Amino acid sequence: MNPPEALQAFLYRGLTATHRVARMVEEGVLQEPISQGLATGTTVIDEFEASARTRARRMGRIYELLFCLENSMRELIGRTLKEAEDLEDWTDGIETEILKRARKREAQDDAARWHGPRGESILSFLDFPDLGGIILDRWDDFEDLFGDRRWVERYFNEMNPTRRALAHTGDLTEFDVERMEMRVREWLRVVG
């Protein structure tokens, strides 16, 4: 074997081993190494069963996807309403009852002074279905972007059960995870 082929084979074996080790950690077969600062003790998470920690790690990856999706939706809605010419204040584009519930949550969060803020915008205090409701209520502002109103209705109706399960520490099936990833790709394709 000549030197370039040997190097290529070595790198391939290294990448394959790295990928396999990461997969074993994700599956709970191996434990991640303890950081230097924690070498002498355990962390709070270590108090839970290994199977619960493994499921949590798996759901953490999907939660990250949901976090990015939902917050990008909030940004899109805020930006679109701020650009709407018929609104004196962009929050006027949010239905009164939805805005009332959001303001109530905001006040509850303000009262819990020991806890950091949920977000800087009233949009941070909306439920997931409310985001779809705003898009549909202000369809004239969003039609050019989405094109198909029924698609938006179906999207939020279909995503909400998965989102709710994940947000309330549910354990999604692999099918649910794959479906959510596909639906997020679909959203990104539509909104660009």
Image (cartoon, grey):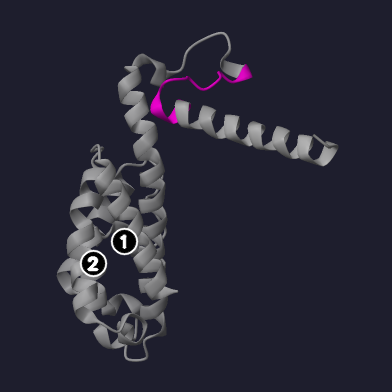
The mark nearer the N terminus, 1 or 2, is: 2
Q: Can you say whether 155 is above or below 42 in the image? A: below
Q: Can you say whether 137 is above or below 38 in the image? A: below
**Horizontal relation, residue 138 to residue 184: left or right:** left
**Horizontal relation, residue 126 to residue 50: left or right:** left
Front residue of this view, candidates 2 and 146: 2
Q: What numbered label is drawn on residue 155?
A: 2
Which residue appears at 57% of the width and 8% of the height?
40
Q: Position of residue 191 (x, y in %)?
A: 40, 74
Q: Residue furthest top?
A: 40
Numbered-mark total: 2
Which residue appears at 29% of the width and 45% of the height?
111
Q: Position of residue 26 (x, y in %)?
A: 43, 30
SS assignment at label 1: helix
Split into 4 quadrants, where in the image is the N terminus?
top right
Split into 4 quadrants, where in the image is the C terminus?
bottom left
Q: Can you say whether 137 is above or below 178 in the image? A: below
Res 100 visible: no
**Residue contact between numbered discs 1 and 2, judged by CB atoms under 8 Å:** yes
- Magenta region: 25-36
Q: Position of residue 159 (x, y in %)?
A: 23, 58
Q: Which residue is mark 1?
A: 183
Q: What numbered label is drawn on residue 116?
A: none
Res 130 visible: yes
Q: CA distance from mark 1 to mark 2?
A: 8 Å
Residue type, label 2: Tyr
Front residue of this view, candidates 51 and 75: 51
The crowd level at tag 1 (other Cα within 10 Å; few <14, some 14-19, many 20+) is some
Front residue of this view, candidates 9 and 116: 9
Residue type, label 1: Arg
